[in-house]
Amino acid sequence: MRAPFFAFGMVLLLAGIAPAADSLNVRLVGYEDTPSPDGYSVALSGDYAYIADGVLRVISVADPAHPSEVAHVDSIDYAWAVAVAGDYACVAADIGLKVVSVADPAHPVVVGQCDAPEIAVGVAVGGGYAHLADASGGLRVISLADAAHPVEVGHCDTKHLAYGVALAGTHVLVADCDSGLRIISVADPAHPVEVGHCDAPALAYGVALNGEYAFVADYSYSMRVILVADPTQPVEVGQCHVPGGAYGVALNGGYAYVSADAGGLRVVSIADPAHPAEVGYYEQPFAHGVCVLGDYAYVGMDAVGGLWVFQLYGQGVQEVTNDDWPVVNAGPTVLSEASVQSIASKVVFDAMGRRVVKPKPGVCFVRDAGRTRNVVVYR
């Protein structure tokens, strides 16, 4: 197993079955084992997830509960990160950029390559360009006008190690490890230039943008919120503690989904960016790449490997241990094992509308006294 700037431990995964973990408001709904343990980056396009774990893997997620690998490309020279735009997957690799045609996801083909001086570990695509985080090589701007012949048109050195990258119009946000967040103008792609920076993240690995705010995964145990309305003067306005070292971050529906090396998947409400607050988690160690679509978060795991699919199923859940579970409940009810049998006499349906005789862990629907309520059964 390789890692560019840090080392990780290993855990044992038996028979490809994900172990149980402590959780709050987040459940594991699907899992696809992969031979490589290094799930550093995940991108989504249509019914497919693309995971960079040394090679590029294409995994069908049409059914999130049963993800399934349909293809992989191993001629990548070690894949660290991936971004998908149209019919192409742009892969950050040891050698620089690899362009892979995914017009037919079941038969991906490398069609182009552009070398970079260092190890490319992050990539974002937009406006016909790939923006490559090239570690000590800074930011590289690569034209994709001819996908078969991508060519570097400009670069900008960064203070430390360019790791994560996100686009903000004519600016690129770079998570620059020890140097925090750097903001680089690419209005002229041939002459990118740094216009602002915020040193607050002590160890910036990942970054995502939502409007005027950048959300930075800080490996020194936090997610930082940085106002970037004025790119020349970014300023930190909030932070949320993330146990285990934040590695990546993805945004969806008023939430930040933060992957943490030892803390698993953490879900943070960003409704008030100045006061982000954790609302859920699933403590499976070695969470790295993260991408979100709808209700599902797709996470690539280091050490244990594979693509893991999680779901945020609501807030304000309450556990009950007897038959007196409430009729009025703003969110799902979480039942302990002792309570499972208490609902057997009621009318229980699964998500497909089928009658359930013996409820199992997962989400089911209970009709009781003329009311239908959502119930989460676990343990």
Image (spheres, rainbow, N blue to C red):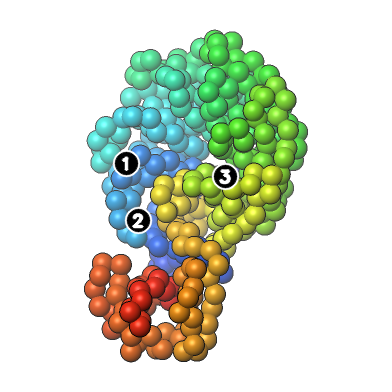
Read off the residue under disc 2: 64
Amino acid type, mark 1 = Gly
**Front one among 92 and 23:** 23
Tell me residue 335's x, y (percent): 47, 79
Image check: 334 left or right of 349? Answer: right
Residue 72 in percent (x, y) is at 34, 42
Residue 59 coordinates in the image, percent (x, y): 34, 48
The image quadrant that residue 104 belongs to is top left
> Secondary structure under badge 3?
strand
Q: What amino acid type should be assigned to the residue bearing mark 3? A: Gly
Q: Is residue 336 above or below residue 90?
A: below
**Mark 2 vs mark 3: which is more N-terminal?**
2
Residue drawn at (59%, 53%) of the image: 268
Density class for disc 3 (Cα within 10 Å; few <14, some 14-19, many ≥20) is many
Residue at the location (73% across, 33% down)?
235
Is the residue marked by circle 2 packed among few (<14), some (14-19), or many (20+) residues within 10 Å?
Answer: some
Instruction: Check disc 1 and report the residue beneath it.
Output: 46
- Sequence-wise, which precedes: disc 1 or disc 2? 1
Residue 248 circle label: 3
Tell which circle, 3 or 1, labels the residue nearer the N-terminal end.
1
Left or right relative to 343: residue 288: right
- Please tell me whether residue 116 is drawn above or below residue 248 in the rendered image: above
Horizontally, residue 344 falls left or right of residue 122, namely left
